[in-house]
Structure formats: C-alpha cells, structure tokens
C-alpha cells in the first residue's frame, strides 16, 4: 500500500527534477513491463479470470486491479484463499499458476505495445544507456511479449518473478538487475506504473519515473500513486508522453 512509502522528499518542479537526475549521472534505465511498456490487460486479466473460474472462483477485472502488481502467485493465492480457504488454496495454487501462464501465452497477440516505445528504446540505446527489464511477470510470458514485439534485443538484462524470492515492493529484483549489469543504484532509474514499483525504488534509494498509464491503477488508487510520486520528487509522464523519458535520460549524460 502507498502508506508504506518512506518519508517524502518534498515537492520540486520539473527543472529541479532534471538537475537532480543530471547530478546522479544516470547511465542505466530499468523498466517494468505491464502497464509501463505494454497494455497486457486482455491477456493478464482475462487469463486470471479464466484460470480462477476453473477452480470455482469468480472475480471481476475491477477486483483484480485492486491487488494487481505482485505477481501471479500472490494474485491467485489472494482470491483462492478468499473463496476456497487456506488449505484448499494451497492444494490448487500451483495448478492455477500453470493454467494462468498457459492462457496468457495463448493471448500474447492481444498484448499491445504502448505508443512510441520502440522509438524510446532505440533512442536510449543510441545514447549508450544500459537498458533492463524488471517485471513480476513470469519469464515465459515476459520473454514471449518482448520477442513478439521485437524489442528483446534492446535489453541487456531481463529479470522476472522466476529470478527472485521476494516480490515487489521488495527491491530484490532491482538489486539483482543492477548487479547483473555491473551498475550502481544511484546511477540507475526505474520506470514503472504502480505503487509496488515506486515503493521498491524508494526503499532502495533509486531514482524513479512514474508512467501514469492508468491501465492497471485507477480511481482513488491512481490519485494516491500520483501524489506519492510528487511527494517523493519523481517525474510523471502519461503513456502518450512516454518518449519524454528519453529526453529526461539524455539530460543526465
């Protein structure tokens, strides 16, 4: 929850944000996937609803969005326990995870790349920035999406929920990503769309940029997320302004 975000750094304007980022000399940009670079709702939400229904659990897309972002295991377990109880949930959880993953892979064609993402990645790559992916999607799903859209080659590292023992907002995946690239925390920037992403970066002391896509985070939760980003001094871009990320990063070289 956003209430766990560490103490805010205070409001600063965009020029001050850029000056701070320049001082940090960011050379690595780490991206979340779902809701940040792609709209995966038809696949992710649809696969989750169908998988849970096969175990007698009925959920809505709105219910899923309230707890989305911590990976399939956490998401499925939440609703399995709610409707089936802890013992039965434990019995069927692994099967439910496999069913959902299979359904998602079948729906890869429905995952849409957000506007100008390829242009953004190409620009950053041309500027000699190290690029990485840190997502709570499974390795099979994340890599399939990246290959399907022809963007996997831009990333020097792709870490998924399969590579960590702790889910976001624990920053383990960011720590491992920076280590894999031989980088530094304060010279890396995490780009994400959720409170889990923001909290992971804040906990680690890593610069963060919020993509305010509104795909998975909506309503009051979206307003709280924007507020938390502003209070911590982080830049915010809308999904149709995603190319601005390149402009901010380029000012840091």
Image (cartoon, helix red, strand yellow):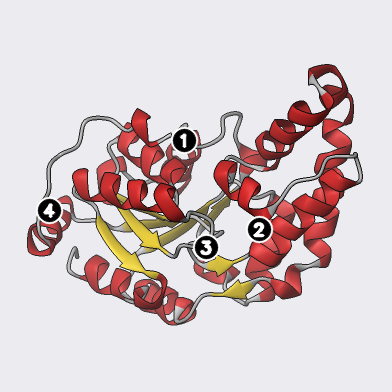
Name the foreground residue: 166 vs 84.
84
Which numbered tag is attached to residue 20? 4
Q: Provide the residue designation for mark 3.
A: 215
- Residue at position x 31%, y 52% from top? 226
N-terminal-most mark, 1 or 3: 1
- Of badges 3 and 2, the one in the foreground is 3
Label 3 packing within 10 angstroms: few (<14), some (14-19), many (20+): some
Judge the density around disc 1: few (<14), some (14-19), many (≥20) Cα neighbours within 10 Å. many
User: Going from the N terminus, do you reach mark 4 or mark 1 first?
Assistant: 4
The disc at residue 250 is: none
Helix, strand, or loop for circle 3?
loop
Q: Residue at x 34, y 52 (%)?
A: 223
Percent coordinates x, y for residue 122 in the rendering: 42, 78
The answer to which of 55 and 210 lies nearer the viewer is 55
Residues tagged 4 and 1 counted as in contact (Cβ below 8 A): no
In the rendered image, the vertical position of residue 42 relative to residue 87, given as above or below: below
176 displayed left or right of 10: right
Q: Nearer the viewer, mark 1 or mark 2?
A: 1
Q: Residues within 10 Å of mark 4 (few under 14, many from 20)?
A: some
Res 169 label: 1
* Residue 142 badge: 2
């Amino acid at each position: 929850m956003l209430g766990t975000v560490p103490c805010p750094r205070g409001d600063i304007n965009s020029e001050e944000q850029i000056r701070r980022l320049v001082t940090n000399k960011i050379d690595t940009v780490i991206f979340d996937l779902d809701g940040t670079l792609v709209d995966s709702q038809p696949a992710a939400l649809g696969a989750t609803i169908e998988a849970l229904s096969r175990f007698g659990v009925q959920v809505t897309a709105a219910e899923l969005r309230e707890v989305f972002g911590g990976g399939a295991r956490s998401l499925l377990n939440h609703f399995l326990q709610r409707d089936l109880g802890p013992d039965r949930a434990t019995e069927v959880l692994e099967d439910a995870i496999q069913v959902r993953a299979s359904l998602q892979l079948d729906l890869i064609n429905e995952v849409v790349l957000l506007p100008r993402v390829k242009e953004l990645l190409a620009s950053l790559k041309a500027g000699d920035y190290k690029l990485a992916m840190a997502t709570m999607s499974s390795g099979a799903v994340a890599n399939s999406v990246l290959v399907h859209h022809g963007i996997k080659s831009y990333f020097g590292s792709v870490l998924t929920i399969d590579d960590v023992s702790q889910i976001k907002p624990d920053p383990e995946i960011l720590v491992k990503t920076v280590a894999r690239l031989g980088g530094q925390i304060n010279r890396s920037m995490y780009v994400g769309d959720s409170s889990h992403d923001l909290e992971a970066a804040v906990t680690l002391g890593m610069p963060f940029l919020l993509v305010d896509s509104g795909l998975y985070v909506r309503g009051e939760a979206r307003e709280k997320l924007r507020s938390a980003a502003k209070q911590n001094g982080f830049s915010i871009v809308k999904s149709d302004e995603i190319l601005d990320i390149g402009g901010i990063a380029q000012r840091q070289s």
